[in-house]
Amino acid sequence: MEFPEAQFNRIFGVQFFGDERPNLENRQILAAVLYRTLDEGTVLLREGDACEAVPFVLSGSIRVYKSAESGREISLYRIQAGQSCILSSGCASAAASFPASAVVEMPTTAALMPAPVFRRMLEKNAAFRGYVLAQYALRMAGVIELVEEVAFRHVDQRLKEWLDARRLTAGGDRLAVTHQELADHIGTSREVISRILKDWELRGSLELARGEIRLLPAFSSLAV
């Protein structure tokens, strides 16, 4: 069984330090990192919380989302193995409050880097800065795509309406359709469809299999 410290070094060591071994100062900094095993459903951060630490996921998945007063939610991104949270990075750097919410989707092991340690690493370590900037680039591309989907295309609403109609014509909850076929019907890319369907699956509204989608009871009340 691999200990979290060893797992952290294996996953993030090269990204933080390149091919070089961390020097004494960096080892002392990393000694302040905390390791936690988080159960599914654990709320890691709520909107308005202070960012006391930045999570680096070793295994599992954390969903970062924004919720409205109506209770409707929109997933901004997911943090999975080898990734970190750019919103946490930003508010930890600026001592600001967290602008969204973060919840654990499945049993997750994470390394929590205290905000002062994060700021020191950002200042002292060029490889670490490069990793953080790469995470920003990755997330910003995803969020821009999400904004395009929601603000301009309303893909999620059109997809739900299509699946509801197909269920009526099929006479059952098991629909034989591929993600590419759905993309062709809706008028978007397969990647966008796959992203939405995966989000709905993780929310317990449907189940995905090769060439098939099974709509669960919660799909009828799914808010889009």
Image (tube, rainbow, N blue to C red):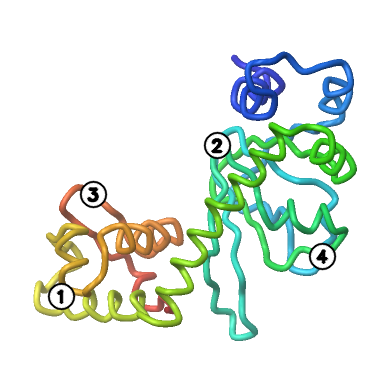
Q: Tell me the residue at 16%/73% (across/down).
A: 185
Mark closer to the chain start, 1 or 3: 1
Tell which residue pokes out farthest to the bottom in this image: 70
Q: What amino acid type should be assigned to the residue bearing mark 2?
A: Ala
Q: Are marks 1 and 4 in contact (CB under 8 Å)?
A: no
In the depicted view, which residue is nearer to us: 91 or 105? 91
> Which residue is identified by label 3?
209
> Which residue is identified by label 2?
81
Q: CA distance from mark 1 to mark 3?
A: 17 Å
Look at the numbered disc 3 and give the secondary structure of its residue: strand
- Please indicate whether residue 120 sits to the left or right of residue 175 in the image: right
Q: What amino acid type should be assigned to the residue bearing mark 3?
A: Ala
> Which residue is identified by label 1?
166
Mark 4: few/some/many CA within 10 Å (<14, 14-19, 20+)? some
Mark closer to the chain start, 4 or 3: 4
Residue 97 circle label: 4
Quadrant position of the C terminus in the picture: bottom left
Q: Quadrant of residue 108?
A: top right
Q: CA distance from mark 1 to mark 4?
A: 44 Å
x, y percentage for residue 210?
A: 19, 47
Mark closer to the chain start, 4 or 2: 2
Q: Tell me the residue at 52%/71% (across/down).
A: 74
Q: Is residue 97 above or below residue 186?
A: above
Q: What amino acid type should be assigned to the residue bearing mark 4?
A: Ser
Mark closer to the chain start, 2 or 3: 2
Look at the numbered disc 2 and give the secondary structure of its residue: loop
Foreground disc of the pair 1, 2:
2
Q: Quadrant of residue 12?
A: top right
Q: Quadrant of residue 95?
A: bottom right
- Please indicate whether residue 98 sits to the left or right of residue 152 in the image: right
